[in-house]
Image: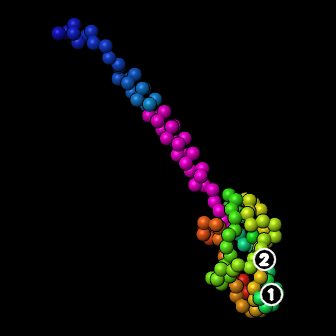
């Protein structure tokens, strides 16, 4: 019986522990790389900073609200809708483009009736309906 037990070949506990640690480290590196690649897409942010509103007092044909904005996020986006005091405004235009790259500035001009002393809340939205910036000021 002694000969039978001595002739068996097996790994020593030290070698087994080293192999187990190596496999654990390799799997954890693979999982970390996979999670890192997933989070890159989630880290892109869309944020518009409205820096100022300029008002031109007037009726629906001469009144203007000029919205000064900066894309302070990390991804480009297109401004699709502008709301003024909760109402969707269809008469607006941009200085150069509706699509804003990161770290760029733009102006949007809204044509509508503007009365002195009234508060105006301006909100900008992306194509998918996400709000990207809001600002309130008094004319």
Residue 67 image offset from top left, x and y in percent: 76, 76
Please tell me whether the stretch drawn in magenta is mainly helix, strand or loop: helix
Image quadrant assignment for residue 21: top left
Residue shown at the point (76%, 92%) measured from the top left: 115
Image position of 98 with respect to 120: above or below:
above
Residue 52 in view here: no
Residue 139 image offset from top left, x and y in percent: 76, 87
Residue 120, which numbered label? Answer: none
Q: CA distance from mark 1 to mark 2?
A: 13 Å
Left or right, 28 with respect to 134, comes to left
Secondary structure of the residue carrying numbered label 1: loop
Q: Nearer the viewer, residue 84 or 25?
A: 84
Q: Which residues are magenta?
A: 24-48
Residue shown at the point (60%, 69%) measured from the top left: 129
Residue 44 in view here: yes
Residue 61, which numbered label? Answer: 1
Q: Which residue is mark 2?
A: 109
Q: Earlier in the sequence, mark 1 or mark 2?
A: 1
């Amino acid at each position: 019986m002694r000969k039978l037990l001595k002739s068996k070949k097996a790994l020593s506990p030290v070698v087994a522990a080293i192999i187990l640690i190596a496999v654990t480290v390799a799997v954890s590196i693979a999982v970390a790389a996979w999670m890192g690649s997933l989070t890159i897409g989630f880290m892109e942010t869309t944020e518009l900073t409205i820096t100022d509103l300029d008002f031109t007092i007037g009726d629906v044909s001469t009144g203007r609200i000029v919205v000064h904005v900066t894309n302070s996020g990390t991804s480009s986006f297109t401004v699709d809708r502008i709301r003024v005091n909760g109402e969707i405004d269809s008469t607006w235009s941009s200085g150069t483009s509706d699509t804003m790259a990161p770290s760029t500035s733009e102006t949007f001009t809204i044509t509508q009736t503007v009365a002195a002393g009234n508060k105006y809340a301006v909100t900008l939205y992306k194509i998918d309906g996400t709000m990207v910036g809001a600002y309130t000021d008094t004319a």
